[in-house]
Amino acid sequence: MVCNVADAESIDAMTKAVLEKWGRIDIVMPNAAVQPPGFVSTIQPRHWELEFRINVHGTFHTIRSALPSMIENGSGNVITISSIAAHRGGSHYGATKRAIESMSIGLANELKDQGIAVNCLRPVGGIPTPGLMMGRRPGEVGPRDLPELPGPESYVEAAVLFAMQTAQGVTGACLTDAETVLQLAGRSEFEKYKAMNPASWSEGVA
């Protein structure tokens, strides 16, 4: 269904529709994000505020909207989405993703005793959507050149692996998809995805 993640009332309407149809919420994975053009020193203030409203506040409101159902059931799984940009340089997009990581760790600590696992997935690459392809440097118009990107398969696998965790097992983790596959699925699965992806996917992962 259509949902405006910049609007808490729209998020609540989505949650209500899910509960009316299914009666419960077991997994919530806020994945909407924007990345406006410019740098921290040049981004338009309204774009800075929009980016935090969607990336951070949208994630917060989506989780909070789903929490009552999870708390009532005494179980649930929250998977937030960060980015390697959170630990590379100092972009405004990375700032939103750092905020999400910190929020995720805090939520994991708060919700562990209520049976809800919270983990953060930090994809190594990105899906080549129009938003990712858009040039962001001053004066840059149209698509930009990107390095070879990993396919979506490892993101999906990592998300499924996180969705299988429990609050008494793995919670409060912030891992790349490569790290998630290695730690939660084992070496053989890691090697399978390593062979499918460019070398950058497994760089720095033992």
Image: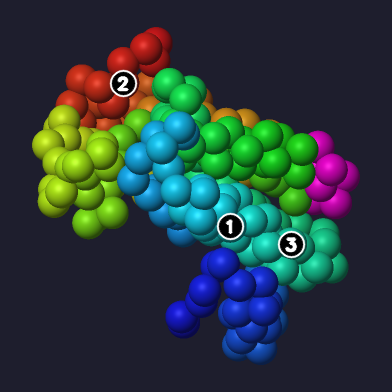
The answer to whether residue 31 of the structure is visible from this angle is no
Rendered residue at 39%/15% (across/down): 205
User: What stretch of residues is rendered in magenta?
Assistant: 108-115
Amino acid type of the residue that numbered disc 1 sits on in the rendered structure? Arg
Q: Judge whether residue 112 is colored magenta.
A: yes
- Mark 3 residue crowding within 10 angstroms, few (<14) / some (14–19) / many (20+): some
Label 3, label 1: how far apart the Cα atoms are = 15 Å
Main secondary-structure element of the magenta-colored stretch: helix
The answer to whether residue 118 of the structure is visible from this angle is yes
The disc, 2 or 3, on the residue closer to the chain's N-terminal end is 3
Q: How many marks?
A: 3
Across and down, in percent, residue 2 comes to: 46, 80
Q: Which of marks 2 and 3 is in front?
A: 3
Tag 1 residue: 53
The disc, 1 or 2, on the residue closer to the chain's N-terminal end is 1
Amino acid type of the residue that numbered disc 3 sits on in the rendered structure? Arg
**Depth check, front residue: 66 or 75:** 66
- Mark 2 residue crowding within 10 angstroms, few (<14) / some (14–19) / many (20+): many
Q: Which mark is residue 184?
A: none
The disc, 3 or 1, on the residue closer to the chain's N-terminal end is 1
Q: Quadrant of residue 126?
A: top left
Across and down, in percent, residue 77 comes to: 65, 53
Label 2, label 3: how far apart the Cα atoms are = 34 Å
Rendered residue at 43%/43% (across/down): 43
Q: Which mark is residue 64?
A: 3
Q: Which of marks 1 and 2 is in front?
A: 1
Amino acid type of the residue that numbered disc 2 sits on in the rendered structure? Ser
Secondary element at tag 1:
helix
Q: Residue 202 carries which label?
A: 2
